[in-house]
Image (cartoon, coloured by chain):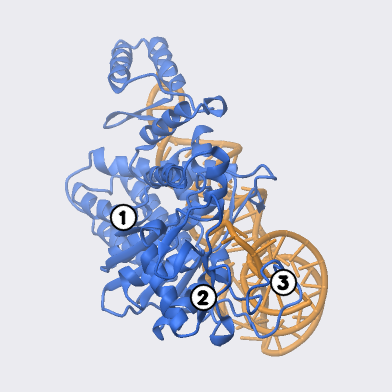
Amino acid sequence: MALQIFNTLSGRVEELKTLADKRIRMYSCGPTVYDYGHIGNFRTFVFVDLFRRFLRHSGYQLNHVMNITDVDDKIIRNSSAKGVGVREYAAKYEQAFFEDMEILSLEKPEEIARATEHIPEMASLIARLQKKDFAYKTEDGSYYFRIAKFPQYGKLSKKDMTAISDGARVDLDEYEKDNVRDFALWKSPKPGEAKWETEIGPGRPGWHIECSAMAMEYLGDTLDVHLGGEDLIFPHHENEIAQSEAATGKTFARYWMHVRFLLVEGQKMSKSLGNFYTPRDLILKGHKPSSIRYLLSSVPYQKQLNFTFDGLKQAANSVERLRNFKARLDTGRFPAGSNPEMETLAKATREKMRAALEDAMNTAQALAAVFDMVREANAAGDNGKLLRDDIPALQEALGDFDEVFAVLEDDDAQKSKQVLQWARAEGRLADAALAESNLSDAEVERLIEQRQHARKSRDFAKADAVRKQLADAGIILEDTKDGLRWKRK
RNA sequence: GGCGCGGUACCCAAGUGGUAAGGGAGAGGUCUGCAAAACCUUUAUGCGUCGGUUCGAUUCCGACCCGCGCCUCCA
């Protein structure tokens, strides 16, 4: 089977067929860097990451562009409220975004495009649109897109723009527009706001034009896939289509994929409800980065995901189970020989995972396949039916899994530490429940040695006391047949 | 009002016209100096409600109830 995805444009699940065989041109809407990203943003970004990883795993050569919107109304408003320049303000949150990407194990796209570095491309796109009469300039120097001239308008969001729907509100201030639905391509300069001198005059770009200009700049007139959060379907992506296709006369993006919003504790996340979280907030509360990534990955992207603290705990336990299995494969000792059933199991698991992800990125089903393997291989191990030569095949299958899900590497403690340092620097330590483990690896090893001595001399009281001491510092010990293993909680 | 999505065990969640994956949690057991890990057993005659189609529906159709999203530069 080949990769199937749900295409918002057609409203159907379709086979993904790229323009150039095994090369994919994709564009995903990145952050507007006006504040720290929240877990809702990161549901989308985590999905984009899973998708790119799976594409690469499937043999595609990726050309993925993500934008950073570093000029917009909110950035202008927030930066002036703080009395810092727009560039400086945006740079801080852009940096934070990159840090968050690393914390959540998100790969960097091949190209990261900043809006402010592509102003001339946007201006020339607007000039093209004006030449074709798809854009017009108003008295104050702003430019708008003429929706009436683009009959396909609404094809992505399935809106009939010829009729004004009842509930839709209209901004009456913008009387200069020919039609209330026309959207801004370019905003005339206002005192105190960032502005650029361009071929179409001074001002700053509208929201949508950057993505059209940058996507086409890096990927050509027609891209294979365009992704984003579901809220972007309208107006953002609809407008991108209008701008791009009006200018080029060609299809802008052949497939549109949209990630559903998440709920937090059953409700829409909002600051007023007090259920608004950034990954940093959660890490400071003691949750692991891998738990966040796992939870965000575990529900297929087209389904609403209810993000709860209970779910976060469950995710942590699930990741733990997978890591324990990995450790068993990596460090356990097994009898010589091979059991063909294990090779079959590994192969079947890899195929099931691939089939699940090819089926419109059904991550839940892919996870089920891995857990089936974990259980069966563990059982075989307990029964002495897991043999030395079986290990590589199982490791490979687990590696396949982690190429996409990326949760097995135990770097949570180190990542959390970074967040703690950030919190300290920002003076936010007050709300940090995260306890810093004050034991270095060497100290842990030293205590473990003491305990082993005690055990050898059958002084179990002493041994247990040491274990208790380590447990209090967040260190878990496991006495296995193959020796002692320890890990940080 | 228009368009759309969803309601599956204590929690998360997959799925199919033929009788309910997987994970977490709970209970019991095996193993262990004790733990941990792991394994085994167990927890939905039931898949929002009510009708209909069918030999048979959780899966198809209709109505209703509930939740959610977009229609406002919120991912």
Q: Colour of chain A?
A: blue
Q: Nearer the viewer, mark 1 or mark 3?
A: 3
Decide: few, some or many residues near mark 3? Use Cα within 10 Å; few <14, some 14-19, many ≥20.
few
- Alpha carbon of mark 3 to alpha carbon of mark 2: how far? 22 Å
Q: Colour of chain B?
A: orange
User: Residue A239, percent across and down?
Assistant: 52, 73
Pinpoint the chain carrying mark 3: A
Query: Which residue type carries mark 3?
Result: Ala
Q: Nearer the viewer, mark 2 or mark 1?
A: 2
Count of marks overlaid on the render: 3
Question: Disc 2 designates what residue?
Answer: A8
Residue topped by disc 1? A403
Q: In the picture shown, does residue A372 fall above or below A159?
A: above
Q: Position of residue A476 (x, y in %)?
A: 40, 27
Callout 1 crowding tier (Cα within 10 Å): few <14, some 14–19, many ≥20:
some
A305 and A174: which one is in front? A174
Which chain is mark 1 on? A
